[in-house]
Amino acid sequence: MSSETPAGALDRQVELIRAQAEACQQLGSPLYAYLLGQVADDVAAGGPTAMVLAGHEDAPGPSALALRLMAAVHRLVLTERAPALAAHYPSVGGDGDAAAAWPAFREVLEEHQELIRAGLASPPQTNEVGRSAALFGGLLQVLARAQRPDLPVRLVEIGASAGLNLLADHFTYLAADGGQWPRPAGGGSTEGVTPGGARPATVVLDPAWESRPLGIPEGVEVVERLGCDLAPIDARSQEGALSLLSCVWPDQTHRLDRLRGALSLAAEHAVRLERAGGGDFLDRLELVEGQHTVVWHSVMWQYVSLEEQQRMLARLTTLGDAATPDRPLTHLAFEPRRLAPGAPHRFVVAATTWPGGTECLLGEAPPHGVPVRWGDPTR
C-alpha cells in the first residue's frame, strides 16, 4: 500500500468491503461474510490484502471490488491452485469452515498476489440463473394478457453476460404451492420435466415462485435469442464457464448447480451475443412482423449511467410507438427500485408492453431471483 494513499480513501475501501460482507450474510453466504470481514480488518492493518488492492482505493461501490477479489481467489480454488483453501470451499467439496478458511485465504493472497491483482480487472458476472424465475415468470404473465398470445417470441437481453437467461424457456419452474411450469405431460410426476415433457430438465428452480401464476400459457415458442454485453462471455468455452463459476459464492452450492445445468444447456442451444452497450444495441433493434419482441434485463440498470439509461428508454419508446398487435414490444425488467421516497430498494418485476406503453408491476423477489412473490408490490 502506498504511503501516499489518502487515509479517507482507504477508510472508504474498508467500509465498502464491510458492507459487502453484510450483504453476503443477508443473502445466505456465511463463508463470504466471515472472510470479507477478515479482509476488511486485513486491509485496515496493512496486511497482504492491502497489497493486493493497492491502487483501487477510489474504486466506486458499483464496481464491486470486494466481489472481484473473491472471484479471483475462487478461480484459483476451482483450478486446483489453492488446495489448502479448497479444503474449506464447498464448491469443490470443502467443509465450509470459515474460521479455518481465513489463514489459507490470506496465504493465497500472499502467494498469488499478481494473479489476483490481474483478476481484479474482470467485473463479476455471475449470470445468475435464478433471475429467470422473475424474468420468465413475468413473460408468461405478459403473454397471458397479450392481444396476440399466439405470436412467437424474440428474446432480447441487455447486459446478457453469457446469455444463460435467454435459455429460460428450457428451465423448469416449481412453485411453493405445488404448481409447476410447464405442467408435466399426462398429469404425472412434476419432477424434472422440461417444456413439452421431452426430457429431464438440467435447470430446476425450486421454489421459483411462491405460487404459480394463474392463466399462463403452457408453451412458449422462442424463435430468436439475442443479447448484448460490454464484455460477453462464451458459455461454451472452458474459460467462459470458469469465469462464471468463480463469481458464484462457494457455499451456495444450489446456485452452482443451477449454473452448471445452464452451462450444459448452453452447449446445446445457440444464443447470439454482441459486444455492445445497451444504447448502441437497441438503436440497431427493429420490430418484426408476426413476432413479439421482448427486451429484458436483470440487476444491471444500476451499473449504467443516467445518460445511457435515458437513451435506452427513449429508444424503447420509439420502438413502442411503431408496435402493433401483430408486432408487439415488451420491456421486462427485474431491477431494484424505491417504491416510495426514502424507502429501501426492493427488487421488482416490471413490464411495459406496446401498443399502449403502460407499466405493470408484477411481483418482487430477493436479489438472486428466487422465490418470486407475484402481485403488485405497492399494494
Image: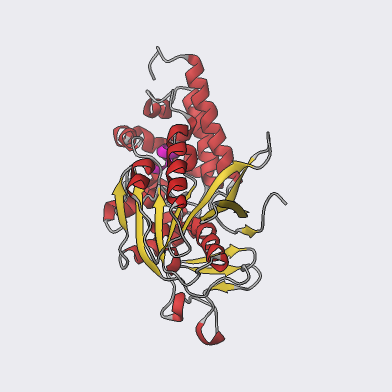
Horizontal arrangement in the rendering, residue 277 relative to residue 258 (left or right): left
Q: Position of residue 109 (x, y in %)?
A: 38, 35
Above or below for 109 versus 90: above
Picture residue at 39% right of the left edge, 48% below the top: 246
Quarter of the image for residue 92 reads: bottom left
| Main secondary-structure element of the magenta-colored stretch | helix
Q: Nearer the viewer, residue 291 or 331?
A: 291
Can I make out residue 88 in this image?
no
The image position of residue 330, as x and y in percent, is 49, 56
Q: Is residue 148 above or below residue 37?
A: below
* Residue 165 part of the magenta segment: no
Furthest residue in direction right, as rendered: 379
The residue positioned 47% from the left and 72% from the top of the image is: 150
The image position of residue 123, as x and y in percent, is 38, 40
In front of the other: 224 or 166: 224
Q: Nearer the viewer, residue 41 or 257?
A: 257
Give how far across and how far down residue 227 sits, in percent.
36, 53
- Colour basis: secondary structure
Residue 69 magenta-highlighted: yes
Identify the image quadrant of the N terminus: top left
> 297 above or below 143?
above
Instruction: Say if residue 39 shows up in the picture.
Output: yes
Residue at x-position 33% and y-position 52%: 242
Quadrant hosting residue 198:
bottom left
Which region of the structure is painted magenta?
Answer: 65-71
Q: How many marks?
A: 0
